[in-house]
Amino acid sequence: MEVILIAGSFMTIFMLLLFISSSRNTEKEQTKAPVSVKGSLKNANNALKNLLVRRGKKSRRREALESELTAAGIMMKVEEFIAFKAMAFVIAGGLLYIITSNFFLAFIGGAFGYFLPTIVVTRKKNKRVKQFNESLPGMITSISGSLRAGFSLLQSLQMVEEESYSPLKEEVQYVLKALQYGTRLEDALVDWKKRMPSPELDMLVESILIQREVGGNLVYLLDKILETIRERTRLANQIRTLTAQGKLSGLIIGLLPVAVGTLIYVINPDYMSLLFTEPIGRMLLAGAAVSEIIGFIFIRKMTIIEV
């Protein structure tokens, strides 16, 4: 019963925050009271523009989240994903409150549960895109060889679909299914480029679209793209090697406080027990955890170099 009450309270707080946020936006629009007919029309026009802008921003955010889920290979609607994040917020916050009886730590745990699905989706997307990029040179080589043998581009894609593995196989199947439903090849390729955020795929699709529009030797274009992709891969590997030392240094510095704290706890448990038994100690632990996470994020951003 206690779990249900706590979970309900956290859900109520979450819904209230959403309601307050939406009501504030409504109040901002209502504060512009008209003083004349001309002013009323002007205010109504401005309110309509602001509404369209806000809806456009929401639509773009929705499309961005939908693209993230698609690139990660997760078959879930945006509404379902948002509901899942809300459930994670309630469950994580409720469980942490039961364990610690501290609303601040419970809120921190709920926030962690809320953002954890987004982190998982991002990592899954990056892993899937990396696997796709690694298999892309083989696909281009196969298409180029099939075109040299006299096959059409559609037949070459079908051969790639039969011989490849996930995630390349799934993406090529998407293109072929779109063609079976009557979609033009150009439109199917553009949709494919939107589904998979890969600069290498962008180059491939753009070259095919240009060749189909103005003509030219597609095999030659594919060979040049293959050389470019391999050179980009070589540079990326060099950069990864050069930044490995910085990542390792950041990892050691980040884990050093944890190691020192664990060592002190083993030597003198009573000295460290205040951090777990006193409310202020728990708050210090939560602040330290947040600082560690922020530090890891900053170091990761500093060591990522786009090729």
Image (cartoon, rainbow, N blue to C red):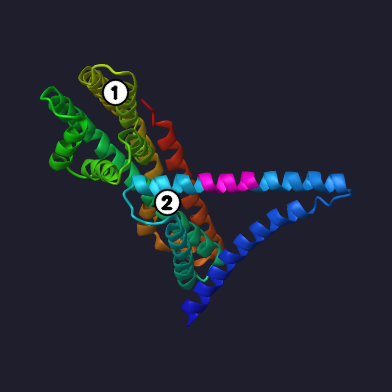
- The residue that disc 2 covers is 118
- 266 lies left or right of 41: left
Closest to the observer, 4 or 42: 42
- The residue that disc 1 covers is 232
Above or below, 129 against 89 in this view is above
Residue at point 10%, 25% (across, down): 149
- 284 lies left or right of 210: right
- Mark 2 vs 1, N-terminal side: 2
Residue at point 68%, 59% (across, down): 23
Looking at the rendered image, the quarter that the C terminus falls into is top left
What range of the chain is rendered magenta?
Answer: 52-60
Q: Secondary structure at mark 1?
A: helix
In whole angstroms, how far apart are the C-alphas of marks 2 and 1?
29 Å
Closest to the observer, 8 or 213: 213
Which amino acid type is marked by label 1? Arg
Above or below, 52 against 248 in this view is below
Quarter of the image for residue 183 reads top left
Taking the magenta stretch, the answer to whether it contains residue 160 is no
Q: Position of residue 21 (x, y in %)?
A: 64, 57
